[in-house]
Image: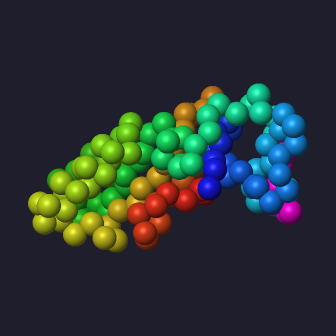
C-alpha cells in the first residue's frame, strides 16, 4: 500500500481509478466528501512511502496513569523515531511491565497548526490512518 504526505496530513493512495497526469488520487472519507476520494496535485506531495511510519515526524506513547504511577508529571512520551519507540516498549516489557492494554501509540506530523495525530496503532502493532 502506498501513502503520501502533504502539509495537511498523511493519506493513502487510491490505485483503483489510476492517477491523472500530475495528480494523485487519495482516499479521504469525511462528511464533505462522501465518496471518499480526492484529487491533489503532485506538487503538494512532500514524501511518498510504503509505510506510515516513514512519513511521521514523531510518535506519541500515551499510557494509563494508574499503571505507571512514577510518571505523575505527564502520561505520554514523544519519540522522533519508530525504532526508538519500539525499543523503549520492549525494554519496559522486559522489566516485567504488562503493556498490552495500558497504552496507545499515535503517529504525528508537524504542520503550521502544530503537531497533529495522523495514525494510531492497532491491536496487531501496525499504524492505521485516522
Region rendered in magenta: 34-39
Taking the spot 74% from the left edge, 31% from the top edge, the residue there is 44
Taking the spot 83% from the left edge, 46% from the top edge, the residue there is 19
Is residue 107 found inside the magenta-colored segment of the image? no
Residue 77 visible (yes or no): no
Colour convention: rainbow
Q: Could you tell me residue 28's position as x and y percent?
A: 75, 55
Image-based side of 72 in relation to 38, left or right: left
Residue projecting furthest to the left: 95
- 40 and 77: which is toward the camera: 40
Q: Could you tell me residue 10's position as x and y percent?
A: 63, 45
Q: Does residue 96 sit above or below 111 in this rendering?
A: below
- 106 and 63: which is toward the camera: 106
Quadrant for the N terminus, please: bottom right
Q: Quadrant of residue 99?
A: bottom left
Image-based side of 76 in relation to 35, left or right: left
Residue 110 visible (yes or no): yes
Q: Could you tell me residue 75's position as x and y percent?
A: 33, 52
Taking the spot 71% from the left edge, 51% from the top edge, the residue there is 13
- 4 and 66: which is toward the camera: 4
Amino acid at each position: 500500500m502506498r501513502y503520501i504526505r502533504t502539509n495537511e496530513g498523511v493519506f493513502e493512495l487510491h490505485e483503483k481509478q489510476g492517477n491523472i497526469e500530475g495528480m494523485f488520487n487519495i482516499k479521504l472519507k469525511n462528511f464533505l466528501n462522501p465518496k471518499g476520494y480526492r484529487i491533489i496535485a503532485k506538487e503538494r506531495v512532500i514524501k511518498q512511502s510504503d509505510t506510515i511510519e516513514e512519513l511521521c515526524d514523531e510518535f506519541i506513547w500515551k499510557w494509563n496513569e494508574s499503571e505507571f504511577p512514577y510518571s505523575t508529571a505527564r502520561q505520554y512520551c514523544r519519540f522522533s523515531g519508530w525504532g526508538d519507540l519500539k525499543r523503549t516498549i520492549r525494554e519496559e516489557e522486559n522489566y516485567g511491565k504488562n503493556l498490552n492494554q495500558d497504552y496507545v501509540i499515535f503517529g504525528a506530523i508537524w504542520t503550521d497548526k502544530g503537531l497533529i495525530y495522523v495514525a494510531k496503532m492497532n491491536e496487531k502493532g501496525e499504524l492505521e490512518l485516522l
